[in-house]
Amino acid sequence: MKALAPLLAAGSLLLAGCSTTSLNEDECRTVDWRTVGYEDGVAGRSGERIGDHRKACAEYGIAPDLEAYRAGRADGLREFCQPHNGYRAGVNGTPYYDSCPADLAPAFVEAYDSGRQLYLRTRRVTDAEAGIEYRRREIVRLEDALARKTFTVVGDTATPEERAQALLDTKQVAERIGRLKAEITDLEKERARAQHELDTYRATVASAY
């Protein structure tokens, strides 16, 4: 069963990528509603997805075959609602719409929660890295501004008022750089903690899914 996980997940992601596409008139008139339901089910989409189909086809005076759609979606959900798909959905940060049938939901949700915890721990690392990178870029920008202000202070073309303002600006920029460096230090500690938690958690679930 694990060998099918990448294929099923890839199919779900492909179908999810089309989830916002409305049916055109020809599709509304010729579509197999059981197949549409199956595709929505195997992609783990919300039951409210039928409302999108209904709205799209209403423009052409066509109503979906709800019975066929629901039967197809039920079949699709039984294929989607397997633990390996739940885990992958959680790892990808994909929302779960509480749509799995009662007999499959417990194992799916347990796996989904495991994947979700990995996703959240990974986000903590990447968020810290993004914060560090932003502050480093800001420091470079401020250091350039500081150099220009310093030139104004020591130059002989500025008025006394301009020098005084440049001196004040220089002090403020230097203080801002100091705060950013302190924030980087804190974020580097946070990243190290988050990376350790991620590595530890990843080791506990690596063999499970």
Image: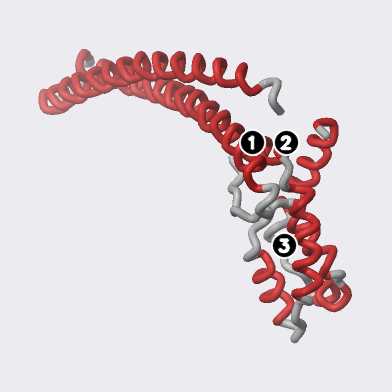
The C terminus, quarter of image: top right
Left or right of 88? Residue 200 is left
Locate residue 91: give its quadrant: top right
User: Given the current orientation, which residue lies at the most extreme front position?
Assistant: 103
Place of residue 142 in the rendered image (x, y in percent of width and height, measured from the top left):
34, 23
- The amino acid type, in three-letter code, at marker 1 is Ala
Place of residue 19 in the rendered image (x, y in percent of width and height, measured from the top left):
70, 57
**Residue 189 versus residue 102: which sits nearer the camera?**
102
- Which numbered marker is on residue 21? 3
Place of residue 140 in the rendered image (x, y in percent of width and height, measured from the top left):
40, 19
Q: Is residue 162 above or below residue 61?
A: above
Q: Do the residues under discs 2 and 1 have CB atoms within 8 angstroms? A: yes
Q: Which residue is mark 1?
A: 111
Residue for point 81% across, 71% down? 68
**Residue 111 versus residue 134: which sits nearer the camera?**
111
Left or right of 97? Residue 7 is right
The N terminus, quarter of image: top right
- The amino acid type, in three-letter code, at marker 2 is His
Q: Do the residues under discs 3 and 2 have CB atoms within 8 angstroms? A: no
Q: Which residue is mark 2?
A: 84
